[in-house]
Image (cartoon, rainbow, N blue to C red):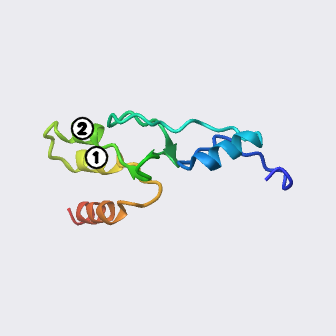
Amino acid sequence: MKEAGMEMRKWISNNTTLMSQSAAEGFDTYPVDTSVNLGSNNSKVLGVAWQALEDCLTLDTKRLLGFISTDKNTKRFLLQAVGKIFDPLGLISPFTIRMKYLLHEL
């Protein structure tokens, strides 16, 4: 990457060999969180939480569920709830598209 003039920053991987090799080459690396507690993983990839040990992406729904639990049943409230879903990779787009389509029919 250096030969191409690109500097790697905020590099993280769940492969320890790759991480040690990257650190030796001078890349900015972050340690992988090895704690077992749920919700303690602070690694993010493209704005989505990544659990490096299990190698899976997770979506935090606590704030959305807290917002929805206020029991407002208006179109505006439902649009706000759908708009609060952050999914840059489109992992749950089948759900969000259906919700937006149902709201469009209202």
Q: Residue drawn 52% across and 39% down? A: 32
Q: Residue drawn 36% across and 62% down? A: 93
How far apart marks 2 and 1 lie (CA) works out to 7 Å
Q: Is residue 50 left or right of residue 4?
A: left
In depth, the one of 36 and 10 nearer the eye is 36
Q: Residues within 10 Å of mark 1 (few under 14, many from 20)?
A: some
Examine the rendered structure and indicate whether residue 80 appears above or below residue 3: above
Q: Secondary structure at mark 2?
A: helix
Residue under pointer 1:
81
Rendering coords of residue 105 (x, y %): 22, 66
Rendering coords of residue 72 (x, y %): 15, 41
Q: Is residue 88 left or right of residue 79?
A: right
Q: Secondary structure at mark 1?
A: helix
Report the amino acid beneath label 2.
Phe
Residue under pointer 2:
67
In depth, the one of 83 and 60 nearer the eye is 60
Q: Residue drawn 64% across and 49% down? A: 18
Residue 100 picture quarter:
bottom left
Point out the tag, 2 or 1, that comes first from the N-terminus.
2
